[in-house]
Amino acid sequence: MRESTGNIVAARNRPGAALVMAVVAMAVLGALVAGVFFAALREQRDGRDGLNRVTALAAAEYGLAPTLSPSVWRRSWNVTASRGPIAQMVYAPMAGSSDSVRVWKLTRNGFLLQSSGTSGVADARASRRIALLVALRIPSLAMRAAAIASAGITASDSSLISGRDTAPDRWECPPPGDTRPAALVPDSLLVSDAGCTNAPCIDGIPPVASDSLAGTPGPYRRLGTLTRDSIAAAAEQLAPGAVYHQPAPAVDALGECDPAAPGNLGDPLLELGMHSPCADHLPVLHVPGNMRIEGGAAQGMLLVDGDLALASGTQFSGVVLVGGVLEVTDGSSLDGAALASRITVRGGSRLRYSSCAVERALRGAAEPVIPRGMAWSEMY
């Protein structure tokens, strides 16, 4: 019995046993700490990656809204005959994220927007891409004549108002449509050509048509699914009394049309060539007062609440909706259609109906919309 007790005491007093046990304990504790640290690090990375994925998706979704806004969406995209990718925009919606939106034109009235959002850096970078189909909501205007006026139409000198469908020079247009009246008024007595020196000054089938509705603004306040007010609100706003002297097309350093350049109202005469970069630039302008264009060339749609004067040989192609008096003077021309309270064409000027110019102007004023029942779809 004593011998056994002595052996136990000797074992307990063996040098290094406690150290070994301490090392083993520390190793086990270190493994536990490392495991906890690794799990926490993994959880932190998963949370960061998840947050980056959510932020990247939010950035991709964000990029669609400004692209569809009137301040970013270019009206030339509505008109261009090009198919495929036509533009790309880059946004920085929030710190650490970015978004790139590419615009594809699929059909005459259909677009695809691809929005690629990213968030994070290096190995923590996340990317999400979504796509959205967009259609054009195009205003429609029942122009039953080349010129419609509620208070009267006057043609004098060697001027011309014509309802014969005419394509602007050098434009690629479909075959002309039927000839329509040159003038539409509430009463045929409101049309005067007594001062004409050439015959006929008013040419159409019939030359003059009358309709009591021409004397009321109601039928022309709504343009299909859009209204004049909604188009005016989305248009470029000019100050009352705006004057354009010799408007002409302008390009930027890359040779692309610069819609922000002063006096750039498109290139209806194709001064920059048959493939002019400004050929598809059809601005929509709203003036809450009077407006005057002197010389040069312009195209698109003019919404003028007051009076509009085209003078000094101005050549305009498109649609003008004038609340007051429209004057086309000094050898100026308007190819398209005009609606005003009163219209005067004199000084060897001309106002000719052009379905091609009307269609392009209305298409330029179209707004991009998401078709009913549609939403963006995630690509990856």
Image: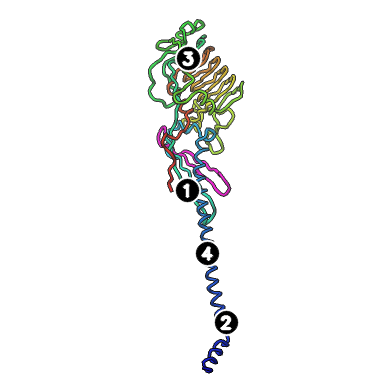
Identify the residue at image location x=53%, y=61%. Answer: 40
When the figure is inspected, residue 376 is found, relative to residue 142, above or below; the finding is below
Q: Residues within 10 Å of mark 1 (few under 14, many from 20)?
A: many
Q: Give me the disc on residue 148.
A: 3
Q: Is residue 167 left or right of residue 2?
A: left
Magenta-drawn segment: 86-109
Q: Amino acid at mark 3?
A: Ile
Do the numbered discs 1 and 4 sit on residues whose CB atoms are within 8 Å? Answer: no
User: What is the x, y in percent for residue 367?
Assistant: 48, 31
* Tag nearer the camera, 2 or 1: 2
Please tell me which residue lies in front, 30 or 323.
Answer: 30
Examine the residues drawn in magenta and state their main secondary structure.
Answer: strand
Question: For residue 373, what is the image quadrant?
Answer: top left
Among the two numbered marks 2 and 4 on one chain, the one whose residue lies closer to the N terminus? 2
Please tell me which residue lies in front, 262 or 61.
Answer: 61
* Tag nearer the camera, 2 or 3: 2
Q: Residues within 10 Å of mark 3 (few under 14, many from 20)?
A: many
Among the two numbered marks 2 and 3 on one chain, the one whose residue lies closer to the N terminus? 2
Q: Residues within 10 Å of mark 4 (few under 14, many from 20)?
A: few
* Tag nearer the camera, 3 or 1: 1
How many numbered marks, from 0 up?
4
Among the two numbered marks 3 and 1 on one chain, the one whose residue lies closer to the N terminus? 1
Among the two numbered marks 4 and 3 on one chain, the one whose residue lies closer to the N terminus? 4
Please tell me whether residue 249 belongs to the stretch shown in magenta.
Answer: no
Question: For residue 293, what is the image quadrant?
Answer: top right
Q: Give me the disc on residue 38.
A: 4
Q: Give me the disc on residue 18.
A: 2
